[in-house]
Image (cartoon, grey):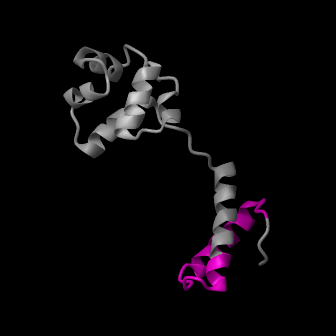
Amino acid sequence: MKPRVLKTEVDYTRALAKVDRLMDAKPGSPQEEELELWSLLVEHYENEHFPIDFPDPVEAIRFRMEQEGLRQKDLVRFLPGKNRVSEILNRKRPLSLGMIRSLHQGLGIPAAVLLREVAA
């Protein structure tokens, strides 16, 4: 199979099999370059056919808190006061631009995620 734009699920399945066969390519080999090309084709197909939406901002904050072992009171470094932290985590107050910047810089949560509309 020659590398080409993947248009069907059959193309996609064949491309995945090709990637699987090339996974043990030696660094710097022609097979490694072929693996990179096939991987890009598969990634493009997946992005087009299986898009993953950004998470809800509050869920993203909670997830990062869990990852970092943070509690609500630890967010006071990034948000103005523990009452504000509670309001945001309970979806009673939206994030302001300043809060988004602070959370992005302090916790590394992508700004695009934090800019999303909070689910009710």
Residue drawn at point x = 62 percent, y = 85 percent: 29
Taking the image as shown, residue 73 lies to the left or right of residue 90, namely: left
Where residue 118 appears, as percent x and y from the top left, is: 47, 23
Residue 60 is at least partly visible in this image: no
**Considering depth in this image, is 70 or 106 the residue closer to the camera?**
106
Tell whether position 33 is magenta: yes
Instruction: Name the quadrant of the C terminus.
Output: top left
Would you say residue 66 sits in the magenta stretch? no
The image position of residue 64, as x and y in percent, is: 33, 40
Residue depicted at 42% across the width and 35% down the height: 104
Q: Is residue 57 left or right of residue 72?
A: right
Q: Residue at x 48, y 36 (%)?
A: 55
Could you tell me residue 43's position as x and y percent? 64, 59
Q: In the image, 21: left or right of 41? A: left
Nearest the eye: 47 or 110 = 110
How far across and down, in percent of the image, does residue 62 sit? 33, 34
Q: Is residue 62 above or below residue 44?
A: above
Q: Residue at x 25, y 15 (%)?
A: 83
From the image, which quarter does the N terminus lie in? bottom right
* Image position of 1 with respect to 97: above or below: below
Compared with 55, 28 (above or below) is: below
The answer to which of 82 and 7 lies nearer the viewer is: 82
Q: What segment carries the magenta color?
A: 5-34
Depicted 39 relative to depicted 72: above or below: below
